[in-house]
Amino acid sequence: MKEGLIEFDSHVFSLDTIKKTLYRFSDKCSFDIAMKDNIITVVFQAKTEEDWIGKIKNEVLDQDLRDIISKETENIRTLILANAFSNTGLIE
Amino acid sequence: MSLSAKKFKLIESFDQATDGNYQLLPARFVALDDNRYLLSNEVGEFLVISRDQLRNYVKKQVPKYSAYYYDLKSKGFLIDKDSNVAVDLLALKYRTKAQRISQFTGLHIFVVTLSCDYSCQYCQVSRQANNDPTFNMSEKTADKALDFVFRSPSRVVKIEFQGGEPLLNFNLIRYIVTTGKTRNAQYKKDLQFVICTNLSLLTEEVLNFCMEHNICLSTSLDGPEWLHNANRPRSGKNGYQLTIEGIKKAQSVLGKNSIGALMTTTEKSLPNVQSIIDTYLENNLNSIFLRPISPYGFAVKTRQAYKYDVDQWFEFYKKGLHYIIEVNKQGYHFIESYTQIILNKLFSPFATGYVDLQSPCGAAISAIVYNYDGDIYASDESRMLAEMGDKKFRLGNVNDGYEHIMLSDILLDTLESTLSESIPMCNDCGFLPYCGTDPVYHYATQGDVVGNKALSGFCSKNMKIFRHIITLLEDDMEARNILLSWIFYD
Amino acid sequence: MINLFSNNNRALGAIYHQKPFIAKITTNANLPKALRSNQILLVSHPEQPISNDFSLVLVAHDTKLSSINTLHLAPELRYLKDNDVVKVYPDSLTIYVLYRYKANANFFPVTERCNSFCIMCSQPPKDTEDDYRVDDMLAALPLLPPDTPEISITGGEPTLLGDNFIRLIQASKRHLPNTSLHILSNGRNFKNLNLAARVSRIKHHDLMIGIPLYADYSQLHDFIVQADNAFDDTIRGVLNLKRCQIPVEIRVVIHKQNYHRLPRLAEFIVRNLLFVDHVALMGLEITGFAKSNLKALWIDPYDFQNELKEAVETLANSKMRVSIYNIPLCVIHDSVRRYAVCSISDWKNEYLEVCMNCSAKQLCGGFFSSNVDIAGENIRAI
């Protein structure tokens, strides 16, 4: 298909997740996004014929995983970086 | 198990972890192909896994006694109640990789003249006609530039002479080398010199000087004679012949390891990767750098920059790498340099110095350029952009203070904006630890130092290369062994 | 295999000593009298005189003579030579050999206590009061010839000695300023930075600490050493030692429980411990616990040659120094044979009959005496 519409439940996927996903397709498609009554609606127009709905849905799932990782590891990441840049050098 | 049961406990007794109860460590992932993903951590350790394995990892469903669980643990993707030393190790490894930022400016480029005896179609340097002294660097400028060089904290400093054709101002090269070495007695840095030259002026005097001071040479060899001369026309003697003669002379006087060559890809090169590599093999060279074309200088004016898209160049690279691996299988150790850099990023605990793949970008902190007129640029590309009329990345002049240059807004803003971790699409890309940012490229092509990576030729090219190399490592054991032998550990 | 102690000695007359004592061996019956009281004379031939004034005389030939302060030396100890150092227990007439000048390795086991309980331990730990071992080493050190190339401190776990551990390193430096010191430790107590710093402050001229790491993840390593948190402690210990710029060697004993992870362990070491000074990949010595746990541990090295090859290549490619110890050349993949080192202490080193025709016998370390029965059908002459 070259154009279409996908709906996402905003309780399942955040608006940020959807936006980050669509950004990755910005060379191939253009998008309109709207949110009403907790439903996120994405309307797309692509340059070529491909299974865009399938691709976008899959990428949303992947992006969702990324967001889970990011949230869970935020604190430990700060700890690791703080540790990395702290001043423990060689002991004379 | 058959341990004498009285005294010894089984492995379960020493495992304080419980199923489904592990903690994720920072990780990113990216699809390699339809079935596989690359999972990478903050310091570039990685695993190639399936989609299911990825989901299980994130959803904490990897079973405790599987090899996959232990791989995730050992490579720093999770910690559990049994062990958390991975956190200490990650901090140490991150620090090691970040070292280059505090040890900044390893590469100092001196543009000693803009004069050149060639008229290369794709010239990024915007050369000037021969021997107009206004386009030569003066000793006074060189002295001031050397002041800057020795302000670098980096223990290893490489001074690279570029041009035009730098040998057209050989006296200044001589001056800079001798003055530099004398001044270095105080700083005791590991000081190295390279001359990027077309070799047409490689006299005995120059060779002796290089031998005396351990100077390496780097030249352009675009391929077989017809291709080299088509890309790099020269009035007078046959450029290809001069280059080959120069290489032979340099190899015999300075040794095979003291001269390297690189090629630049043009439209004409694209169908001929094998014969280009053959030219290198015939001339006893150790390595080739399969470079694409960059959108600067004369390349844009003559419309060379847009003549081929990333896909076409990538086919060229793929065929070239395949052929090179075949050559290695025959026992000849020949390296493709860009691949080698990526392999280092994948496997070595150390950062690489390659300027164009750094985060934050290599501007001024990996390399810095002192132009013939004393103007200082954040990188090679920055200077080329200036020659096209856009001085956005000019940091100042050698007459300005070191702090004024290194703490200038343009530099700090650029560094700050080019941290991959802060860039959309880059910040959660599995290739982040191996990739970099190229602010000048994105500025030149999209008008913005960050750019939209979905539209970026830089991103597209690099992702294709990463996918290709990692897939080779996974699927082709023979190729894998050869590629692993290319890695150098510092 | 040679014995390092024996109680098969017979008194040939009354012995002066009442308490155990440590002294150096000499074969020089004409030693100046002023020097004799501190040395033990070894008499090997009947024609040689039994001189007076030595601390003790050992007669290494069969004699019917009586002589005061003289022992008839057990046959199994007759390899003793000049400059060797022994401890003599006058009540039981037992002699322990503490140091051999011509040995390829000299170990001082300074305690039998340990905080690990490795399933293949060749020196099974004992929870005893054995401070006398510290005293023995301190007494022996001044007697060692100054051209001794290297000595080792082992155990048990030497760092359990606390202050005495520091004293031993200091004494090694003081008495033998030209001798390398190799310490075998599980590294766990070095998770306290203070201990590493104390060792560093001694500024021993040539010290290396050999620390075992058996797996690339905690569950397996902790199981092999039978101690919780051992993996984390050991890694932290290594990091602290390197922060204090003390040379560290990682030692990996390979057996059935961990050979399959060997390539991953090599990758782990390259990514995380690239700064260690040496990596030793070692064959199993079938003595102590290794013998009782043989079924769980023994695998013919021939069967892990691929894992060993991969691990060596990973380590060598990264420019780390790597060696293979205690594995015969014929069962090592030939592309990595050059990393094998003759490493078995001479007193427990043997070869098989099939080795006698082997072209590589001079280069090969052979077998542990305790391993010869199980060596396996893959041993062959190269």
Image (cartoon, coloured by chain):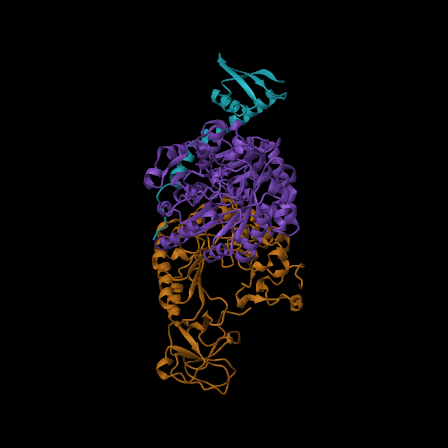
Q: Nearer the viewer, residue C374 or B188?
A: B188
User: In this view of the protein, which residue sits in the foreground, B430 or B485?
Assistant: B485
Q: Is residue B311 left or right of residue B60?
A: right
* Residue C189 can be seen in this image: no
> Measuring 65% from the left and 59% from the top, which residue is drawn there?
C376
Q: Nearer the viewer, residue B76 or B308?
A: B308
Q: How many marks?
A: 0
Please identify the quarter of the rendering in which residue C229 is found: top left
Residue at the top extreme of this rendering: A37
Provide residue B12's location: percent of width, then percent of height. Answer: 53, 42
Q: Where is residue B238 drawn, in percent x and y?
A: 60, 46
Give me the chain that's purple.
B
> Which residue is drawn at the image coordinates 49% and 18% (left, top)?
A11
Asked if residue B168 is positioned above or below residue B56 in the image, the reply reads: below
Instruction: Classify C228 as above or below C279.
Output: above
* Residue B329 percent across, percent down from the top left: 65, 49
The residue sitting at 38% across, 35% down in the picture is B411
- The chain letter corresponding to cyan is A
Query: In the image, residue C228 lies at what x, y percent?
Result: 46, 46
**Front-most of residues C365 and A43:** A43
Viewer can see residue C128: yes
Q: Is residue C216 above or below residue C294?
A: above
Chain letter, colour orange in render = C
